[in-house]
Amino acid sequence: ASTLDQLAKAKGRYFGSATDNSELSNSAYTAILGGGEFGATTPGNSMKWDTTEPSRGSFNFSGGDQIVSFAKSHNMIVRGHNLVWHQQLPNWVSSLPSNQVQAAMENHITTEVTHYKGQLYAWDVVNEPFNEDGTFRTDAFTNAMGNGYIADALRTAHAADPDAKLYLNDYNIEGLGAKSDGMYNLVKSLKQQGVPIDGVGFEGHLAIQYGYPTNMQQNMQRFADLGVDVAVTELDVRMQLPADTSKVSTQAQYYTDAVKACLAVTRCVGITIWDYTDKYSWIPGTFSGEGSALPWDENLNKKPQIYGAISTAL
Ligand code: XIL
């Protein structure tokens, strides 16, 4: 049978999985990660600011380098994640006087993007800039620079690696709604100003108890129509535990619909799941009582119904 990535490739897309450094010491895990199911990977943590520049001007790329090296030797492309985000941001940044934040941000972006120049398919340049109502989050960056920090971050990244695709990435923008309208208006205005933006990432952290996003295909299409690529960057479908047959069939349908939404949009370049196995999913640690979100179980066995749903949809 074809792998998920082979099926995606046949349609001109990639199918990827996030990973994390500690997981790479599990050989049963890496055999699957690098075994052909996935043509792309995203480091779950090791390219974030708190890891890469824990104190000002002191950079550490060892974790990210390890994942890039694994990816290269297994023919996988890498999505860099991420450069500017209000979370996993070291305290020294949030404690800076606001007139020093722009220089710190630009230096962080230039140094990290230069380090990985030529090695990454894409960068999530700014992660999760929006509130649920579609207004910009208030954080160290908006406090220092207003909303213009986003254009500045994109321009800075582009100067350091003109070949990496530059993305804005967020959650709860998969469907039509106030938050995706906020992202839509931002991307439209960035394009009008000639700011280098290549794509929008729709994280896709879905939960069956909250319902499926409204018109995901139509929503991704309106972004594509602005002249940017789109991608599903962090797909998982969680549920309140314990799983039962009805929850799992709803979950299978969500996976099917999300994959089909991407394939229906010509500029949807690929889908990445936020790791492939429940063994290493971030869900149980973040959403109490929830889990079973991924197509492989905690013993690294494929879940026939979920894997089958993805495979059939591809
Ligand atoms: C998560 C990681 O998977 C966890 O290991 C970490 O503790 C917190 O961050 N949106 C994002 C990702 O853009 O960076 C987050 O990753 C999940 C939500």
Image: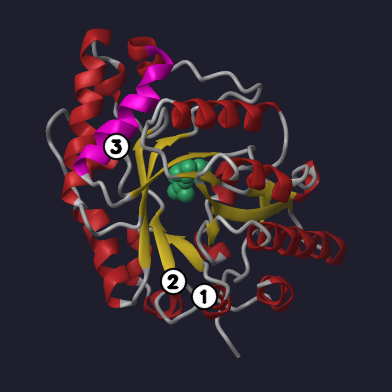
Lower sequence index among marks 3 and 2: 2
Task: Write down the region rendered in magenta.
Answer: 146-160
Mark 1, other Cα within 10 Å: few <14 / some 14–19 / many ≥20: some
Q: Is residue 154 magenta?
A: yes
Asked whether 301 falls inside the magenta stretch, the response is no
What secondary structure is found at the residue carrying circle 2?
loop
Q: Are marks 2 and 1 in contact (CB under 8 Å)?
A: yes
Separation (CA) of disc 2 from disc 1: 9 Å
| Closer to the camera in the image, 118 or 21 | 118
Q: Residue at x 65, y 41 (%)?
A: 222
Q: Which mark is residue 39?
A: 2
Q: Is residue 219 left or right of residue 223?
A: right
Ligand 1 within 8 angstroms of badge 3 C-beta: no
The residue at the point 34 percent across, 13 percent down is 145
- Mark 3, mark 1: which one is toward the viewer? 1
Tag 3 near tag 2, CB within 8 Å: no
Please tell me whether the stretch drawn in magenta is mainly helix, strand or loop: helix
Q: CA distance from mark 3 to mark 1?
A: 32 Å
Q: Which residue is mark 1?
A: 9
Give, as a three-letter code, the residue at label 2. Answer: Gly
> Which residue, given by chain and number where applicable, does mark 3 sit on?
49
Residue 151: image quadrant is top left
